[in-house]
Amino acid sequence: MNHSNEIAIGFSNIVFGLVFLMVAASLLTWIERRLLGFWQDRYGPNRAGPFGVLQVVADGIKLLFKQDWIPPFADRTVFVIAPAIAMITVMLAFAVIPVTPAIGIIGNLNVGLLYFLAMSSLGVYAVVLAGWSSNNKYALLGGMRAAAQMVSYEVFMGLSLVGVVMLAGSYNLTVIVHSQRHLWYVVPQFIGFSVFLLGGLAETHRLPFDLPEGENELGAGFHTEYSGMKFGMFFIGEYIGIILISALTTVLFLGGWYGPILPPFLWFALKTGVLVAFFVLLRAALPRPRYDQFMAFGWKLMLPLTLINILATGALMLCWSTS
Amino acid sequence: MLSVLITLWYTFLHLFHRKVTVSYPDEMPYLAPRYRGRIVLTRDPDGEERCVSCYLCAVACPVDCISLQKAEEAGRWYPEFFRINFSRCIFCGFCEEACPTYAIQLTPDFEMSEYNRQNLVYEKQDLLISGTGKYPDYSFYRVSGLAIPGKDKGEAELEREAIDTRSLLP
């Protein structure tokens, strides 16, 4: 009866979600710098506003007013589209995250997990096209590295989730959360959890896996030629990517919104926040591996590990169901 | 793999360490007394200028930021003008080391930024302080053999009586 009403609610959900994400991602730049500061025995940005929160605003204004330069040798159309893809794909992937039973856009999508994997695969295009269209050696090298890194880590990132899907019996993220009411999947699927985290780290090409933009080797990698808000979009996209991976890990392995006493939304935010902080800690603590080490680590350790994990999960489930 | 986890843990513990940052304008850093900051010209304990215009500081200066002009008054030399261009100065302290009379000294003060570059050229009245700086008791004319009004040769501190080189008496 209330079809238009439903649409209005859905629309406001989307708008609210987007605004919330943008704010969270830009706040995350500040949080990351503060945390990095603390872990390096310094303060980080603490001058602008209370605890330095307004640093976010200052950075935003600065980025907006920077000259938005497109190199004359670049492929103009692709150069402009690439940062948009970076942001769009991560933001679209958020649509399937069930924050709580009430909050979420299409948390009930029956192929939610596959949708997420598809979106994160599309995210590769942003980096590759950015590197390609820049028409610059370093950018191209960064783009190529990103392609190889993301495509190969995609493989076992997907495979690491198979265990969860087997246990829950569904690709629907809401169903997956519901099936974790008694036991978070981080316990039976610990290998899957670790592999997914590392794969997510590689997907968002964050430190220590930021080989596509390794500053000491490639200038700034795929976004060497980007400036102003186009660079800002890559930047924000990366931070939304961190939130996305953290949120998804929460949903898949840490029981989503389930938790005692506190309201569901707070539980979700808390778990996601801890994971985000863990991402920053990884950045603060670990050096970047060499590229061949990184690929070898993926194909020679992570891939067999996930396959064994799937095998063991399947075997145990079979034993369980027959006995 | 274990080393990675240990690294993570130790890095995490740094959250509870004391910060090394000194939040400067709110909290002043400790500067050693011999810190090489703003250059001053000191006076001797009698309140007279110590500088004797020997030009050694200007010679020692690797960036040529010191310029001065000698003048003489009643046997005492003093700088007619003394100018330090602090936009050139590298605060190496060579002038202080070259100075034979402890006149030029570097102080633990570095807050001398200016909006206008010209204001970084300090003249003698900007450089001269009323105190003695790091050597409170030193007075060049009191220890040197130079004759000035009120103090003849051989009357300085720790100085033997002057020998009359023209006399043949032992």
Image (cartoon, helix red, strand yellow):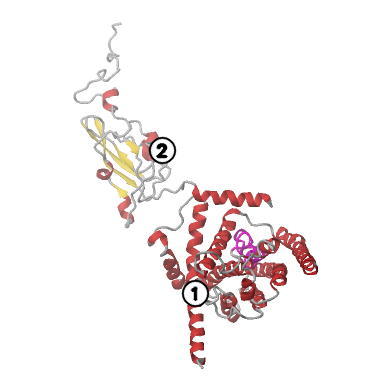
Direction from residue A277 to residue A147 in the image, left or right: right
Secondary structure category for the residue under label 2? helix
Identify whether A288 is placed above or below B137: below
Q: CA distance from mark 1 to mark 2?
A: 48 Å
Name which quarter of the figure residue A122 lies in.
Answer: bottom right
- Chain for numbered disc 1: A
Res A85 seen here? no
- Chain for numbered disc 2: B
**What label does residue B92 carry, if any?**
none
Direction from residue A236 to residue B150 in the image, left or right: left
Direction from residue A244 to residue A141 in the image, left or right: right
**Residue placed most toward the observer, A133 or A120:** A120
**What label does residue A68 carry, if any?**
1
Q: Percent x, y for residue A72?
A: 56, 76
Q: Main secondary structure of the magenta part?
A: helix
Q: Percent x, y for residue A173?
A: 63, 75
Q: Percent x, y for residue A178?
A: 62, 72
Which residue lies at the image location 29% right of the left edge and 13% below the top edge?
A: B163
The magenta stretch is A197-219
**Residue placed most toward the observer, A94 or B92:** A94
Identify whether B58 is placed above or below B6: above
Res A195 seen here? yes
**What residue sits right under mark 2 in the picture?**
B94
Q: Are marks 1 and 2 in contact (CB under 8 Å)?
A: no
- Asked if the stretch drawn in magenta spans residue A198, the answer is yes
Say yes or no: labels 1 and 2 on the same chain: no
Most extreme residue toward the left is B150
Most extreme residue toward the front is A323
Packing grade of label 1 (10 A; few <14, some 14-19, many >=20) is some
**Residue placed most toward the observer, A244 or A42:** A244
- Asked if the stretch drawn in magenta spans residue A239, the answer is no
Packing grade of label 2 (10 A; few <14, some 14-19, many >=20) is some
